[in-house]
Image: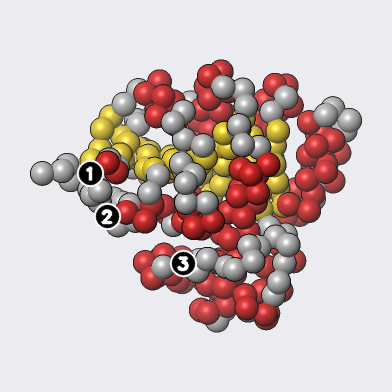
Amino acid sequence: MRSTIFSLLLAFLAFGSEWRFFKEVSFEEIVRELLKYRVVYLGEVHTDEEIHELQLKIIEALYKHDPKLIIAMEGFQQPFQEFLELYLDEEIDEEEMLKGTEYRKRWFPDEKLYAMLWRFAREKGVKVVALNVPTELLREIKKKGLKGVKSVYLPPEPVYPPEEYRKYLLEQMKLHGHKTDEKRFIDVQTAWDNGMAYRLYKLLLLYPEHRIVVIVGKGHLWRGYGIPYVLKKLMPEVKQAILYPCPEERFYLLFSSDFSKECSSASSKSPPN
């Protein structure tokens, strides 16, 4: 793995301000910072092998400090949790787990990119949780709209995205050539983020002593929106941190806690006055 440049985007909430500044830090300093938070998002570009290697390195370091750890992975859909449990309990092998979770049908990146994570978890007895909502639910919402669908995978009342995140999502829709109604596209993305945040919310209640490391695409974390924004609405007191990759510029952004005050100018490198 290349020598990573950690330029961290830090927010100092005690001052109630919205400014940030960049600071180059060591890996050890990153870990010390992440240990302050209950939910740690390790954002990814799904096919970037070096990002996955860094994810493992961070998980290993967090585990060394405190083994009460849960890894929540977007690559697995929630209805198939039992096969992850069987794998972690060494009752089935890796190939059986991949077939049982329908991993190759429901997640496009090569499993070799993620195998190091679940193998580490099995070796150390760390729980791995299927984070993603079922594909079938998102298809139903695409047809009927979010208001027309009730599901155990969604919170009782959905948290809708603010305008800045809506604009970002629509830009992504056009960028990727999605040919669909804009409202339905936003409904699907809203359900997607809500479903994963709701899963984390329930895990936090069920495992009050554990830290959750979230392995998820960086689009679900953009400027603190997406999953962290929804979880903040569901559980305002929870402390969250995001390590957000910018591989094309070879740095990582770290921002945390009160995302309601941290969702603008995320790319600014200007220091405070």
For the view shown, which residue lies furthest in the top direction? 64
Residue 80 percent across, percent down from the top left: 79, 49
Per the rendering, the mark at residue 161 is 3
- The residue nearer to you, when weighing 104 against 218, is 218
Q: Which kind of residue does numbered mark 2 sit on?
A: Ser
Secondary-structure class at tag 1: helix
Q: Is residue 154 above or below residue 1?
A: below
Q: Tell me the quarter of the picture where residue 71 sits.
A: top right
Residue placed most toward the observer, 151 or 186:
151
Task: Say which residue appears at 47% left-offset and 51% top-offset.
Answer: 236
Does label 3 or label 2 sit earlier along the sequence? 3
Query: Considering the image in quadrants, where does the C terminus appear?
Result: top left
Q: Residue furthest right?
A: 91
Question: Type of residue at label 3?
Answer: Pro
Height in image: 72 above or below 127?
below
Between the C-alphas of marks 2 and 1, the distance is: 17 Å
Residue 136 — which label? none
Give the distance between the C-alpha atoms of the residues marked 1 and 3, in whole angstroms: 26 Å
Q: Considering only order in the chain, which callout, 3 or 1, is on the residue closer to the N terminus? A: 1
Amino acid, disc 1:
Phe
Residue 120: % across, % down? 67, 25
Vertical arrangement, residue 117 with respect to residue 44, above or below: above
Question: Which of disc 1 and disc 2 is earlier in sequence?
Answer: 1
Dot 1 corresponds to which residue? 15
